[in-house]
Image (cartoon, rainbow, N blue to C red):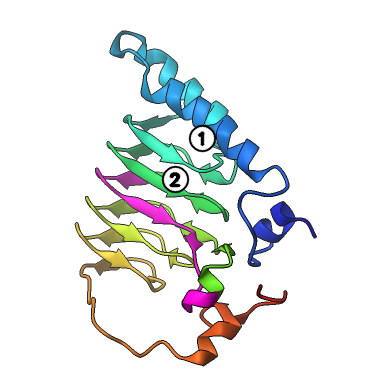
Amino acid sequence: MNQRERMLAGLPYKAWLDGLEEERFACKQKIYDFNHLSPKSYELAPDMLKQILGKTGENIWVEAPFHCDYGWNIEVGENFFANYNLIILDVAKVTIGKNVQIAPNVSIYTAGHPIHPDTRNTGYEYGIPITIGDNVWIGGNVVILPGVTIGDNVVIGAGSVVSKDTADNKIVIGNPCKVVREITEEDRTYYFKDKEFDVPIE
């Protein structure tokens, strides 16, 4: 597989090879145009978003500025609204349901890097998909980490860091940042949780 195929398969890949850098540059141009749209021309914004994102409902709105890596790897449902400063690192698929509301300064990260410094310094990174259900409200300054699935009708409190799946009909709040373990030699083997490198690490 080339590096683009590896990225889409959730395997470790190098982001500057096999046309990926050029695809991100093309997205940056579209994002630049959207983020610099005059308020007098805001009626153009939904169609510009539809040219950036892979799949959308008819009724969508995102307040500028907005940033993403590729755009085509993001799907949003009907009645999608996102406030200022939404960041989506879409190196893996991001699927968002209908009637989702996102407050300012929300970050959705499918991208990550290996834990061990030696493997991290090789330049390999990875993407693990994120799925957000229908009727979800995401509060301001929330961070959603790789591999998370959020169920339907969920409310995520402002400032939360979501690192685990959330079932339907839940209110989730908080950021329990604490030391969980030491980095060990065993970490060289893995690029994400229990997922082992399938290529030599050089």
Q: Residue at x 59, y 30 (%)?
A: 26
Relative to 185, say whether 136 is above or below. above
Residue 95: assigned label: none
Q: Residues within 10 Å of mark 2 (few under 14, many from 20)?
A: many
- Contact between labelled residues 1 and 2, with CB atoms less than 8 Å apart: yes
Looking at the rendered structure, the kind of residue marked 1 is Gly
Quarter of the image for residue 122 reads bottom right
- SS assignment at label 1: loop
* Residue 200 on the magenta segment: no
| Distance between mark 2 and mark 1 Cα atoms | 8 Å
Residue interval drawn in magenta: 100-118
Q: Quadrant of residue 99?
A: top left
Say what amino acid the circle numbered 2 marks: Lys
Q: Residue at x 45, y 67 (%)?
A: 148
- Is 3 above or below relative to 73? below
Report x, y in % for residue 82.
33, 39
Q: Which residue is mark 2?
A: 98
